[in-house]
Amino acid sequence: MRVGVAFGGWWLVLTAAWWAAALPGQALDGAQGVALWWQLRQQALYLSGVWSIGMMSLVMLLALRHPWMERPLGGMDQVYRLHKWLGMGAAVAAVLHWAVKESSGWIKDVWGTAGRPARDVVLPWALEWRSAAKDVGEWAFYALLVLVVLTLWQRVLPYRPWRKVHRVMPGLYLLLAWHTVALMPAQLWQWPLGGLLVVLLAAGSVGALWSLAGQVGKGRHRYLGTVHAVQLLGTTPGQDPLEVLCALPARWRGHTPGQFVFVRFAGAEGAHPFTIASAPGGCGTAPDGRTLVRLVIKPLGTYTRSLHTVLQPGQTVSVEGPYGGFDARGQSTRVQIWVAGGVGITPFLALLQARQPGMAQAESLAPAHLHYCTRNANQDVLLPQLRALCAAAQPPVSLCVHDAAQGQYLQPAHLQAYGAALDIWLCGPAGLGQALRQAARRQRGWRMHQEAFQMR
């Protein structure tokens, strides 16, 4: 919900700034016939350009994943959702901008050039760069479309090569920012659009340069530790989950149950997001006093399937975070429902451990009902641990297992039995989330809190 409001709000801000600076009402007033079409084209060219560069500028800032971004959006996972939607919005606006630009030939062939506006007056220094800026913008636009397609069509390009290709994006932004500055009409540089774009282009360019320099994720929220222990939870390497205990330095600021971190085991691979599967203090400390945190990594891709062959105790690990707001806290007057599917069980392992005897407990915790969706309960190596944690949890957490191998799928009717006022905390596959969200729209009183754990 917050992401939709933020996206729509930003679109309105850009549109309002264009309206105030371009004054389209005055430009279109009195225009008739062919002149009207030319004026409509000109205003559409302005607006689509403002949308595209305005959204891309915010994309560059969100890519820096500063912790302050979490509070207004509800977690770093939501920051990435907004990053993705803004990127797609910028691409759509760029397509519109290109199509409007190309429409000049069509209008000229059909109606002629009568009433065509004079060439826009640009900033004085940009006169000699007009032609080059057009060419650069066009080629950067084509490259942008390719990157967006590769991002959305995930089967074409696996994560590792996609990540390397995606690093081209900040460079494309810098080219498109120059295209904007060199070709934007002088009249649009007036307040408020001019001031807004100056701030956005400057901030976006700094963010792009910071990303190109490889500085994203570095700073006081990044910690260098070591792998303390590695254990295969099961018997089949590359298929069963891997438990990794990481020893973090004394300056580790701690986490709350349900948060995740970006972890880098190998420098060339880059950072991957993993949920912390332990409560604060739940794993104790290493012999040297360093805090231990637990990761439960399910082998879902090429990288995670190979981790059991490369991770060794004592190996250096870089941890960035923690991030996220998936704390499963709700109002005492509402029933707490937890829904997990597949690897989505990991934040609930931490939440359950926080409810075990002897652990520090917050007074606001309330009883909860956990629905766990698994492909095959008989082969699920995490299920025995999950049952033990639920059995000992205080306040209590009931457990309902939905075994796909037995045809036991979670249905909205299972949740309706708890009443109308529900706080539903969901972490699992996109299909499961979509089904429950559709049901929540039909049920007054259902509040959905979904961990959008998809960083691509």
Image: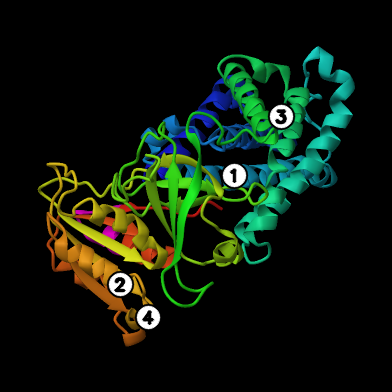
Which residue has dot 4 on it? 379
Disc 2 secondary structure class: helix
Q: Which structural element holds mark 1?
A: helix
Instruction: Determine if residue 307 is in view.
Output: yes
Residue at 62% across / 48% down in the picture?
270
Residue bearing the label numbered 3: 177
Give the mark nearest the N terminus, 3 or 4: 3
Measuring from the top left, give residue 226's x and y in whole percent.
Answer: 50, 46
Query: Is residue 125 placed above or below 376 in the rendered structure?
Result: above
Q: CA distance from mark 4 to mark 1?
A: 40 Å
Can you identify the residue that label 1 sits on?
87
Task: Give above or below for 277 relative to 2.
Answer: below
In the figure, is residue 32 to the left or right of 421? right
For the residues labelled 2 and 3, the Cα–Cα distance comes to 52 Å
Q: Closer to the camera: disc 3 or disc 4?
A: 4
Counting residues from the start of the chain, the first of labels 4 and 1 encountered is: 1
State the residue in front, 169 or 50.
Answer: 169
Work out how far the residue at label 2 is from the one at label 4, CA to CA, in angstroms.
9 Å
Q: Quadrant of residue 50?
A: top right
Secondary-structure class at tag 4: helix
- How is colour applied across the structure in the image? rainbow
Mark 2 or 3, nearer chain start: 3
Q: Position of residue 160 (x, y in %)?
A: 66, 56
Q: Residue at x 66, y 20 (%)?
A: 188
